[in-house]
Amino acid sequence: MKITIVGAGYVGLVSSACFAELGNHVVCVERDGARVAQLHEGIVPIHEPGLPELIARNLAAGRLAFTTDLAQGVRHAQLLFIAVGTPMAQDGSADLSQVLEVARAVGRHLSRFLVVANKSTVPVGTAQQVHSAIAHELAARRLARVPAFAVASNPEFLKEGAAVEDFMRPDRVVIGVPPGSAGTRAESLLRRAYAPFNRNHERMVVMDVKSAELTKYAANTLLATKISFMNDMAALADALGADIEQVRRGIGSDRRIGYDFIYAGLGYGGSCFPKDVAAICHTARAAGERLRVVEAVQAVNAGQPARFAERVLRHFGGSLEGRTIALWGLTFKPGTDDVREAPSRAIVRALVAAGAQVQAHDPLVHSLDQLMPDEPAAQRVRLEPHVRFCADPLAAARGADALVIATEWKIYRSPDLPALRRALRAPVVFDGRNLFDPQDMARAGFIYQGVGRGQ
Ligand code: UGA
């Protein structure tokens, strides 16, 4: 099948490589020429396990090509996926300018039946807007025979760090198709594209376009809700002297609840949950509704890093002046180099604001430029003298008055505790990811605080 994917970001690259691996001829269109040149040399701009190998193999096999030429992409495709960015606008809504730009280009170059499927996370009603933008451009061309097209929704559910695996072994494939004959053709084309995943189980969930668009938000919002719920419970566990980790095991064993996404910690970060939760709240308000539960989810999450930093401050009597704090983990979760909305950033700011020197370690983030690429240079210059990046976890701990753990990278899970104790000036650990058993830590001579461990 001939597939075009517009956008060589994280969703676009993974989808391009995986569809090519399934035997399709894939053109991936990216407007950033430097990125296209790099990709042709096999340099992959994101950290995603298995992706460089897939890209290299399919480039070599001639099933995958990168280009900046959108017109070429439109001419190539039977099926075109839009996988461009939808950043958050100032008011929390999703900025659709890139999506609509692609739609207009499709309208300008379309010459035969095409299915356009949205993979970007877009507000309900976007497919309609994409349809109108394409139709508008087509009309302007005053063609004798206007080619038919269909706009479908095909949200993705990939997790960073496991995206290739998630793509190749999906729990389900959601597609939303419009009514009418173009919609029927779209459904059969999309079913063909995903047929390899459907051999043993029916994984296709076919529905109308708006429901598919809402499904994506509902999925991410429910997962975010589980996390904020647990963080709320963790605060209560602290107040009551209960242990949220024991509670987690107790409730997770109920299959209706499940063990996934019920880890208390520093809150959710990344490029998806914070943005999607804000966008769905915005959509609801625009539709005259309010999502009261989801607004509370957002508020709990926004407060989580500050709450944790507050705990560190309290331990030191309200000021960190003259103190050195070690910080392990900066990315928003392990297995990625992504720092977007990472709780560590708020924690660094809070620690420095309270007077601390921070000694940081992360397997993939080694500088303030990397940690805060999107913040004003002045902010980085202010932080620069107070944040030092260390080559290994023990080096970061050396001479520090306390250790703060912000991301649960594997290398932090079983440290040499006696060596850690010797490295720290005082044996104090604030564990934002509940990696350790409080009793074990107490036995090893540490003053240990987690999230919701009853302190
Ligand atoms: C998330 C969803 O899991 C994907 O299904 C979805 O496709 C993707 O967003 C998206 O919309 O593109 P991702 O952002 O890669 O994927 O990260 P997750 O693994 O879901 O983690 C999100 C955040 O929640 C992390 O900050 C993590 O530390 C936090 N988290 C997760 C918790 O605090 N507790 C948990 O129990 C689980």
Image: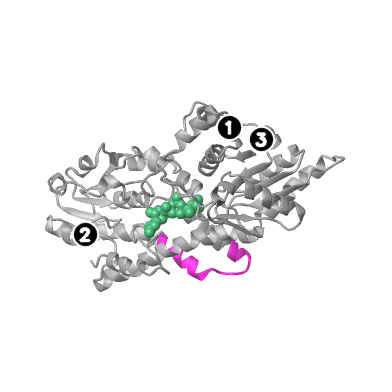
| Residue at which label 3 appears | 73
Front residue of 204/56: it is 204
Question: CA–CA distance between discs 1 and 2?
Answer: 50 Å
Ligand 1 under 8 Å from disc 3 Cβ: no
Around disc 3, counting alpha carbons within 10 Å, would you say few (fewer than 14), some (14 to 19), or many (20 or more)? Answer: many
- Please give left or right for residue 195 compared with residue 134 in the image: left
| Residue at which label 1 appears | 63
Residue 367 image position (x, y, % from top left): 35, 37
The quarter of the rendered structure image containing the C terminus is bottom left
Circles 3 and 1: CB distance less than 8 Å? Answer: no
- Please give left or right for residue 427 compared with residue 233 in the image: left
| Residue at which label 2 appears | 437
Q: In which quarter of the image is residue 69?
A: top right
Identify which amino acid the numbered label 2 is placed on: Asp
Q: On the rendering, which quadrant does ligand 1 occupy?
A: bottom left
- Please give left or right for residue 103 compared with residue 366 in the image: right
Q: Indicate whether 344 appears above or below 378.
A: below
Q: Which of marks 1 and 2 is nearer the N terminus?
A: 1
Identify which amino acid the numbered label 1 is placed on: Arg
SS state under label 1:
loop
SS state under label 3:
helix
Q: Earlier in the sequence, mark 3 or mark 1?
A: 1
